[in-house]
Amino acid sequence: MCGIVGYIGKNARAYDVLIDGLKRLEYRGYDSAGVCLVGEHVTKTFRSVGKVAALEEKIGESDACAKAGIAHTRWATHGKPCMKNAHPHSSGKIHLVHNGIIENYQQLKDELTQKGYRFTSDTDSEVVAHLIAEENTTADFEEAVYNALSRIRGAYALVICHEDEPEKMIAVRNSSPLVLGIAEDAYILASDASAIVQHTNRVIYLDDGELVIVTPEKHKITNLRGKTKRKKEHALEWTEDEAQKEGHEHFMHKEIHEQPRAVEDAVRGRMMIDEGLARLGGLREVEDRLRAMKRIVIVSCGTSYCAGLVGEYMLEEYAGIPTEVEYASEFRYRKPLIDDCTAVIAISQSGETADTLAAIREAKNKGGLTLGIVNAVGSTIARETDAGVYNHAGPEIGVASTKAFTSQLAILALLTVYLGRQRNMSMTMGRRILTELKRIPQKIQHLCDDEKKYQRIAQKYAKYNSMFYLGRKYNFPIAMEGALKIKEIAYIHAEGYASGEMKHGPIALIDKNFPSVIIAPKDSVYDKTLSAIEEVIARSGRVIAITTKGTKEVERIADDVIYIPKTVEMLTPLLSVVPLQFLGYYAGVEKGYDVDKPRNLAKSVTVE
Ligand code: AGP
């Protein structure tokens, strides 16, 4: 899950576009960075360990005048984060950047070593450079690339250039994302559109097995055997501003505050409240198949998995469809029983998570109807599923998913009404859920306005090393999500647990140094959750309670209380999660961590 950029143009300095592009892709990985500037007479490569800023220091003005180049920001998979493993990788006059994993690299490496090629890194990517150089001894640049590609297996997005042909760049995609940006007088290639949007909104999304040859004047797209393909151009919705922080200290903070708009955009034009119906255009083609579905299996990872768990409660209780939720990384290796009456729903913010993509491909092989709830427009999961719904939450840059999560829940609520009304849900119930859903953005805004309170509570509890997050029914998944947030942002070991499970073991951990966040809205299981609070307090455990405005009992017994506005039970997760996002955020800020780029994590996990 590296970030790659390529630029070839008539006027602008490649250096400026490449460095700016790398900074926008840095959330994909920041183990090392590098750039290769291909000038008419000289080609220069610069690499550095760590963030792009370190690379900038290495490049002088005089070096930065080339009009073509490639660049890379790394998330280590093969070969540890260090200088020799930094991209670009070269072989003779061939230079390339790679995102993905070459599965048969060792066998190719042995073969090339036999032929006298000397490897300077531990990466799989360097193999491709030597392979192209080897092919280039008997074929021209383009043919050498095609020949080399026919030998490699695995996931790759590559951008390749040749010192003798500074007016040409070749890029190819197989499983790892690659977008072509078409500007006035130049072409930009990048892992995603956030490195392109400030130059042009005209883009072509490359599909698996597609290669593009670009010169400053034109581009040609072919399959891996050189057969020309026609590709549809798309207009990017995003403005440059959206990608910037707009005055917030961190993208995560900005994205938490964007949730009222994100939920609004998720339901915009999709609710026919009077009829109690949801309109999901992306499902139109499969409407009849959906009506016949007997079972739903949701596959996803991380925060998207927690969203799936909330969806399970909604779909079973209000649409009456048996629903299971699977970790995508497990789903693909156990023998899932999928038939043509099973709808398999992939939930993914990035639309590129390798495990979720593979789970969808597995479900497809088994004849399941595959659907996507995806935020990244044009991403692989969005294009490979039979149908789906876009979140429209806009770009999510902070590694910790926040607005994508609440918009996923809004989409799941819409899907519940959509499928429920195809079955036994009454118009009245449909109308009630949609009416409440329409009020959610404003209720989230009220919660965001209270952030100072969450900041105080976070500062009070940031010193603890372990915490429990407890919830029941719709808010059990929110306990898991709240725990995930404080784990990934403040590195506090927190466990999300079904509050009814505590007495079967975990309660043994409770003492005055092991606080618990307990989500206890005034819902159908409120009394049960209240007794869980009392059980924890009885063992001197400290309690932060999340409950519905006006619920006084909790205030009498809990150490700290956060109130959420009233709403229908199935929608409480869209509210109760917001204070938990702030708790995680402010605990991370309190501890001085880089909350947008937590250690060991990356925004889009494109390898197994
Ligand atoms: C959540 O904050 C994390 N970034 C991570 O768990 C994420 O939810 C997971 O990797 C799934 O990503 P996706 O939604 O892009 O598929």
Image: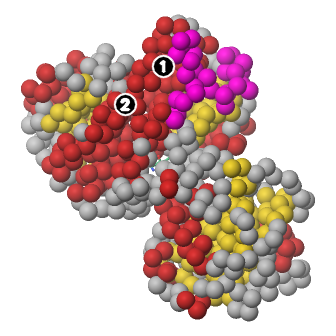
Q: Secondary structure at mark 2?
A: helix
Expressed as whole percent of the image width and height from the top left, the position of residue 478 reads 36, 34
- How many other residues sit within 10 Å of disc 1, few (<14), some (14-19) or many (≥20)? many
Q: Which residue is disc 2 drawn over?
A: 442
Q: How is the image coloured?
A: secondary structure
Q: Is residue 246 above or below residue 16?
A: above
Q: Nearer the viewer, mark 1 or mark 2?
A: 2
Mark 1 or 2 closer to N-term? 1
Quarter of the image for the C terminus: give it: bottom right
Which one is in front, 460 or 506? Answer: 460
Residue at 18 percent across and 51 percent down: it is: 459
Quarter of the image for the N terminus: give it: bottom right
Which one is in front, 392 or 328? Answer: 392
Q: Is residue 562 left or right of residue 15?
A: left
Residue at 41 percent across and 61 percent down: it is: 597
Q: What stretch of residues is rendered in magenta?
A: 265-292
Identity of the amino acid at label 2? Gln
Residue at 73 percent across and 66 percent down: it is: 184
